[in-house]
Each structure stands twice: as C-alpha cells, then as structure tokens.
Image: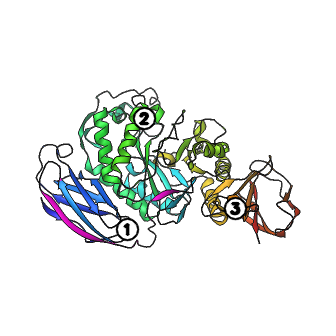
Amino acid sequence: MYAVIYPMEVNRWGLFEFSCKTEIKGNPFTDQFLEGTFTSTHEQKRVAGFYDGEGVFKVRFMPSFAQQYSFVIHFRDEEDSFCSSFKVLSAEMGNHGPVRVANTFHFAYEDGTPYLPIGTTCYVWELQNEVLQKQTLETLKESAFNKIRFCLLPKHYDYNLSEPRSYPYEGTPCDSSVLNSENFNQYTGCATGNDWDFSRFNVEHFQHIEKSILALQKQGIEADLIVMHPYDRWGFSSMTKKQDNLYWNYVLARFSAYRNVWWSLANEYDLMETKSISDWEQYAQLICELDPYGHLRSIHNCGSFYDYSRPWITHCSIQRQDPYKCAEYVDQWRAQFKKPIVLDEIGYEGNIQHGWGNLSGKELTRRFWEAACRGGYGGHGETFFRKDRILWWSHGGCLHGESPDRIKFLKKIMEETSSVGLRFHQMHWDELCCIPDTFSSQNKTIQDKYVFYYGFTRPSFRKYHIDDTTEFVVEVIDTWEMTIENRGTFSGDFTIELPAKEYMAVRLSIV
C-alpha cells in the first residue's frame, strides 16, 4: 500500500475519503477488496471500499458526530492494514445531515430541522451534455424543488433515443443507428449487439454521477437515486443475479456516504420481467447491510403497488393507478401503511400523447394541493414536446410549464401553516380541510390553523364555525394567482365571501 491520502478534519455529515494506490492483482472490481472500520465514542461503522481506476482504491465514510474518530483500513485476504485518526468538526452552515422519517408520516433532517419534500423527476439529466446539465442546475436553483429523482443507468424510451454521455461498464453499445422516432416502439434489439464486460465498471460514469450528487447537495437538493429501471436497449435491465449483486455492491460502496442520497430500488419495478419479488427483497437486504447510514429507501410501481408495509421501506413512493385519482387516496394510504406518502408520479404537466404526460398546469397544481391537504407530498414532472425534443422529465434543461411557480407558492403556504407537515381533518363532506400534523395537536379540540381547499369547485361564499369564542385571522388564498388576502378577525359563526372561481383556499389562524 502506498500514496495514501486522507483528510485530517472533516465536518459532521461531510465526506471522509481515504484513498490509496496499490498493485493491481487480477480484476480490481472482483479480486481485490478494501474496507474500513470507523470508531468514535458514539458509533462504530464498517464500510466497504471500491476501485476508482488507475490503481486507486477508496473508502468513504460519513461521520454522524462531531468528535475524534479512529479508523482501520485493510484489504481482504491480506494482512496489511492502515490505522489512523481524524477530527470531525461541527456541521457547516446549511448542512443538517441526512433526511429521516419524522412523526411517522413526515420528514426531518437528522439535526431535527423539518424537511418538506417538493420533488421533481429528471430521469437522466446527468447523462446529457454539459451545457444542458448546467442549465438544469440553474433551473433547480430558482425553483422550489428540493428533491430530484434520476437514474444511474442510461434510459431508452420515448424521446430518449440518443446515446448517453457515458455507460456504466467497460465495452461498447449496440448500433443505435437503427433507431428513429417512428420505430422505437417496435425496437426489440440491436442489429450488432452490445459488448459489455459486466465485471468491470466504467469508473468515469460513476465519478460523474458523484459530481452531480455533490452539485445537488450544494443547492440543498436530495438525490433520489433510481438504481434499476426497465427502459433499456443495452442489457442492463436483464443482467444475471451475480452481475446485479456486483452492481449493487459497487453503487452502495460509492454513494452511501453522501448525506443527500435516497435509494429508489427501481422505477416501475413491475415492468422488469426478469426480476422477481425475491430479487427485490435481496437488493433491499443489500442496502440495509451495506448502507450503514440508513438512507431513505423505497421502490416505485407502474401497475401493482409493492408491499409498502415491508419493514425495509421507509416511505411509499407511489405512481397513480387510476387516470384521474391519486392524491385523493393519500389519507387512506397513510392509514394503511403508517408511513410517509410521496406521490412520485401523479401525472406530468405537458402536451405529449400519453395520458400521464399531458396534464394542464392547473390540474397538476390541484393534485399537489390535494396531496398536501391529505398529509402527503406530490411529485412534479414536465413533458412538453418542443422542436428541440428536450423534455424536463428526462433531460432537464429549462421549465416551460405553469405549475412550478404555483408549487413554490404552495410550499410557502405549507411552511407557514406547519413546518412539520399537514394532515387531513374531517369537517364537512364537501370541502377538504387540513391542520398541522403534530402529536400535540391531535389531542387538541381547537387547532392553531385550518386550511380549507376547494379545488375545482367554485363557492361564492362559505360559512365557518370552529367554536363559539376562539378568534381567527381569516385569509383567502388564490392558489393559481398566488395571492393571499387578509379578511380580518372572526369568531363563532361567520361567512366569508369568495370569488366563485376554482382553486381557492381559506386559512384560519388563531389570533
């Protein structure tokens, strides 16, 4: 072992990286293995290392406490080891640690700071050209989105027929010249075939993804990593179990120490015909064993829901099963699964031919409000067909829809109403009401705040009665025009005039 490099100080929930250059014996991805044990007063964790190319092996670690750590690095099947220590400083400003489940149905960072997920989907934004990637990050910076779902593997699907910037394995892809916009649905294989060595990873592909995860981290955005998916012409979705296990081990060793990582085992797992439930359970077991930090974990469906009651699943990652209803079921799913409900696909704002990709901005915004008022979290996507054929939902770039600004406004309302999350509160059958979802509030007769959302209905007035004496400040919220109008203070029975238009809400706050 030689050319050892590691920092003497890192911040809490930062990234400690030990690297060393050594003699290569056989295939470094399968025949050599580096691992480390990290110990402090409050924790001890054992983490796997990985090969990063050019004779360099690495071990990464995310410390959970600001204190002195010692560590031992050793190669499997070799007697040599390296021992040393480093100091962990307090977390820098803006670093709140990994996101955890909080109060059963919601989320918070590890330091207790509330986290309200406002997610979007850009499946392979990081595999586009550099200009487009930079544009995506700039767009995210101006948006409300603090979580983004994207794939580790290239994607072959509608409007996604070009080759990615890189591939995960050494080798060459099939000849994509046989593809065009008219025949992609009939395309079932490559004329010349793929030539991959599934035992040797293309380290540059994964290094680039790490840079993307860090770029998101700097902007306070969680990276919801989709590890597997069925949209494939390269053979990555039909690898053998041995090849899958090697892939999972490598991914977990490389990415687990980044604090802003979430694990999504698959997108539309039920479309991957070569994988069984036992396979998914095995992958989940690998995550639980090899990710010592307990990052959030879920799996995304097409038709059939996965069994979200499984103990390894931290939150429900749901795609709608009905053309019209999804957010309307959130309170029922909360009661059924006793976990946070994240609607990672409730339809996308756009104009393509598919029913999931041609919602209006008003309808997608309505679904976000419906989800929030029932105690869940909506997911955004955008699929506008344009001359440049760049769709945010897969490529990133710029947003063109009307919903992102309204979703940003909703986030503001949510934060003002309850930083820890909302829950459905039954009032009248013909209105949707929510209150702050805190354990203390559940035993109170009168809540601090009430939000009534009227969606596509258009009342010209509405009568309210919480109790006979409590005074409330009444605000009328136009969720589409993004305005808040203070109507004054009321108590007992009172009537509020409304503009008889869609997408209105009323918020009551105790004086």
Secondary structure state at the residue bearing disc 3: loop
Secondary structure state at the residue bearing disc 2: loop
Looking at marks 2 and 3 on the same chain, the residue that comes earlier in the sequence is marked by 2
Instruction: Categorize mark 1 by other alpha carbons within 10 Å: few (<14), some (14-19), many (20+).
Output: some
Amino acid type at image mark 2: Pro
Amino acid type at image mark 3: Met
Q: Residue at x 17, y 49 (%)?
A: 76
Q: Is residue 423 above or below residue 69?
A: above
Q: Is residue 430 visible?
A: yes
Q: How far, Cα to Cα, is label 3 from label 1?
A: 42 Å
Residue 46 or residue 506, whichever sits in front: 46
Q: Is residue 53 magenta?
A: no
Mark sitting on residue 230 = 2
Q: Position of residue 509 (x, y in %)?
A: 75, 67
Corner quadrant of residue 345: top right
Image quarter (top left, top right, bottom left or bottom right) of the N terminus: bottom left
Q: Is residue 45 above or below residue 205?
A: below
Instruction: Categorize mark 3 by other alpha carbons within 10 Å: few (<14), some (14-19), many (20+).
Output: some
Q: How is the image coloured?
A: rainbow
Secondary structure state at the residue bearing disc 1: loop
Whether the residues at callouts 2 and 3 have beta carbons within 8 Å, the answer is: no
Looking at marks 3 and 1 on the same chain, the residue that comes earlier in the sequence is marked by 1
Q: Is residue 177 left or right of residue 463?
A: left
Amino acid type at image mark 1: Phe
Q: Which residue is mark 1?
A: 65
Residue 479 or residue 93, whichever sits in front: 93
Q: Which residue is mark 3?
A: 482
Q: How far, Cα to Cα, is label 2 from label 1?
A: 39 Å
Q: Which residues are magenta?
A: 75-101
Q: Is residue 99 magenta?
A: yes
